Image (cartoon, rainbow, N blue to C red):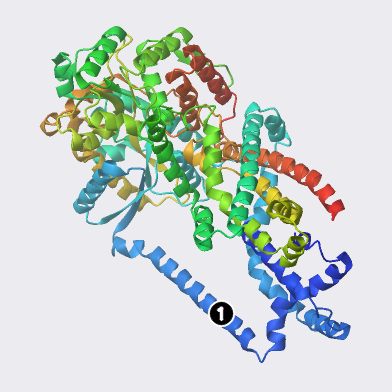
Amino acid sequence: MMTEHDKGVPTGRRRAGRMPAARRDPAGGTASGPGSPGLSRRRLLQAALVGAGGIALGGSLAGCATEPAAGKGKTSVTVWDLFTGSDGANMQKMVSAVSKANTDLYVDSVTLAWGAPYYTKLAMASSGGGKPPEAAIMHMSRLAGYAPGGLLEPFDLDALAALGVRKEDFTPAVWQKAQFDGQLYALPLDTHPYISFFNPAVAEAAGLTVTDGKLAISGADDFLDAGRAMAKATGDTGVSFGYLRDAASCWRMFWGLYNQTGGGYELTPGRSAQLDEKAATGVFEFLQEMLDGKIAARDQDGGAAEGRFMTKRTGMFFSGEWELPTLQSALPDVSAMPMPTIFGTPATYADSHSFVLPKQSSPDPEKRAATYRVLAGLIKQGLTWAHAGHIPAYQPIVSSDAYQDLTPQKIYAPAAETAVFDPNVWFTGAGSDFQNRIGDSMAETLSGKATPKTAVDRMLSEMNRFLSQPNPA
Amino acid sequence: MTVSSTSTAPASARANASRRAPGSRTAGAARTARRKTMRERDRSGYVFVAPFAIATGLFLLWPTIYGLWMSFTNQSLTGTKSSFIGLDNYIEALGDPQVWQTLWHTVVFTLLSVIPLVIVSLGMALLVHTGLPGQWVWRMSFFAPFLLTSAVVASLSSWLFQPEIGLFDVWLSKVNLGPVGWLSDENVAMYSIVLVTVWWTVGFNFLLFLAALQGIPHTLYEAATIDGAGGWRRLFSITIPQLRNITAVIVVLQILGSLKVFDQIYLLTGGGPNGSTRPILEYIYDAGFTNYRLGYASAISYVFFALILVFTLIRLVPTRKES
């Protein structure tokens, strides 16, 4: 590269002159002078070494800091989670409540960013090479990819029962979902459905009937009419649905509505995907009709959709119930209900946060016992968790008076009973490449740039691609 | 690494040039003496390169070799037992339409980005070099974006590109244009990413061009002026030809840089809409880290590596002949 700069100099001379010139720099210092440049370099190196040593020392000290914090005689239990925002704040409250109740335990709560990388880290930590946490939060939808691969350990039901956590304390649907090979692999913390928030004031202005706290809507036409009425009431659009650059939202919306149609599916690795294509096309036709720019804005992302709802420019907002605290800060009387039944059968897309036990390379019975106590304690803190919008999985909390006093939580809590999860295959689930790819392939159809059939075709071809891949676990 | 080594290249070249000026033909005897001391010091040289050599070995050479081995296995990130499967991964990769599709996206990005990154930076360097007042302001403002990290650039630009409330759409709506699906329209998203990338990284090429411009001997311009050459004539007959070599360097560096595209696309569109911007490196990342198939991901990396190698060889052979 250097030679290319000085074309003007004759080649022979350049070759001869260049090498020593380039080398003279480093060697010249010590050789020529009475040592001053050389000395300064040595000093610099020494200083650098001392500095680096200091940093390394500081780093190792910082690394030790967590263990002494556990206190003498305390058993430390590390729990990974992916909760930020109000979820994170509530989880910290629950952790400190459990710590207070168990003075001999130290709960080391580690929050990692949610998304595909969370599951990459969890898999790497659990795969023998890393040091896995004693327990971790996992979306129930990811269980199918984790449990069969031997990354997790099953729960001991007797140990759980001794702590007051039994099968009867959970809804059958969620308990069933947490099983693999006849054993419990996930301890459910909540069900978090994709619901519809609404602004009662806008609904009233639009002349919509509210029964038992829910908007009385059934069927596509009824819903679209309600949307138009709310658009009239707000003077803007009626419904907020943000899907641009948000593959997960596209997928949640589609999969929930598809399950309302009663259309079945078959996703068996090694075979081609089976969907009720007519039903799937119908879902996209409905969504296109809703996203007409009048009922709902055509090109919206999650932030814009939420912003419109909070500034009363729409009356309804499709989102996860975890947005509740945020919405309540702007609209204190915001209400919410399960997904309206558009296609006949009530169904609401949902997932579930649950605790799992990553496989330990050297299991420590004492730590394991402590872990059970921490997890049972956290599950029973479900009322705090309900303030974040989630529906506690531990039923004694849901049936408690305290929970039944929470609105709008108690209005949408029945969504847990009609919850539909991701298809039960290894590659699906929250933060998976599957959700990302399928959701991404739908966006064009939702924005009206492609036909409903295109979305269905693309979806099938993505599903087939995943079905043809080997399961890496 | 590339950054530091290339940024010093023009500077040291200039240093060589000045040192070689009158009197650089020192006596041969002195040179042999110096060579002898050099040889004595050879051993201490190893100590000095050791830190770098160890780091290179640990973090570059070993992973490269290990990756090659992995590409012949069905190694999974989940640590399940892996076995040697021969060329299966390569056969799958060569027949995987996603590999070719994402490779094509990388090539498109490279074509779309290299041209403006070279031309715009040259234009900026020429403007600054003509002696605009307030040199440091220009230099700083053209170079400053390059100092930002990809995450900052992605956050800033995703606000600008935001549908409805983003600055670009707001501006366009003032003149009754748009909205444009900056990151959500399959036909637009790649251009938006190129736009951001040009703004972000053009400063580095600008700096290289500016350094090269300042290295052109003034005598050439003086002689040309005396001969009656005007500004344009000097530009096309002296400046541009003198920049030939640095331009070649910049083009090669830029092509290699653009082929490595990942960060800004991953952060801005995640490869969407409908996979229209997903570069091959993101596919490799997804295959390995999201779908846990490390062996397959390694195989795709090696296919990509081989293609770049072939390209480099084709490109290098004629250059070497020239020089």
Q: Nearer the viewer, residue B56 or B166?
A: B166
Q: Is residue B235 above or below residue A56?
A: above
Q: Nearer the viewer, residue A290 or A180?
A: A290
Mark 1 residue crowding within 10 angstroms, few (<14) / some (14–19) / many (20+): few
Q: How many marks?
A: 1
- Residue at 63% x, 69% y is B51
Which quadrant of the figure has residue B101?
top right
Q: How far across and how far down the image is residue B103, in percent?
A: 65, 34
- Residue at 55% x, 44% y is B197
Q: Nearer the viewer, residue A340 or B114?
A: B114
Regarding residue A149, the answer to whether it shows in the image is: yes
Q: Chain of mark 1?
A: A
Q: How far across and how far down the image is residue B28, in percent?
A: 88, 82
Which quadrant of the figure has residue B208?
bottom right
Which quadrant of the figure has residue A350?
top left
Query: The disc labelled 1 sits on which kind of residue?
Result: Leu
In the rendered structure, the answer to whether residue B123 lies left or right of residue A350 reads right
Regarding residue B1, the answer to whether it shows in the image is: no
Q: Is residue B254 above or below residue B54?
A: above
Position of the N terminus of chain A, as image quadrant, is bottom right
Q: Is residue A164 above or below residue A300?
A: below
Q: How far across and how far down the image is residue B163, in percent?
A: 39, 31
Q: Is residue B182 above or below residue A36?
A: above
In the rendered structure, the answer to whether residue B101 lies left or right of residue A400 reads right
| Label 1 SS | helix
Identify the residue under disc 1: A44
Q: How far across and how far down the image is residue A290, in percent?
A: 34, 15
In the rendered structure, the answer to whether residue A326 lies left or right of residue A150 reads left
In the rendered structure, the answer to whether residue A84 lies left or right of residue A116 reads left
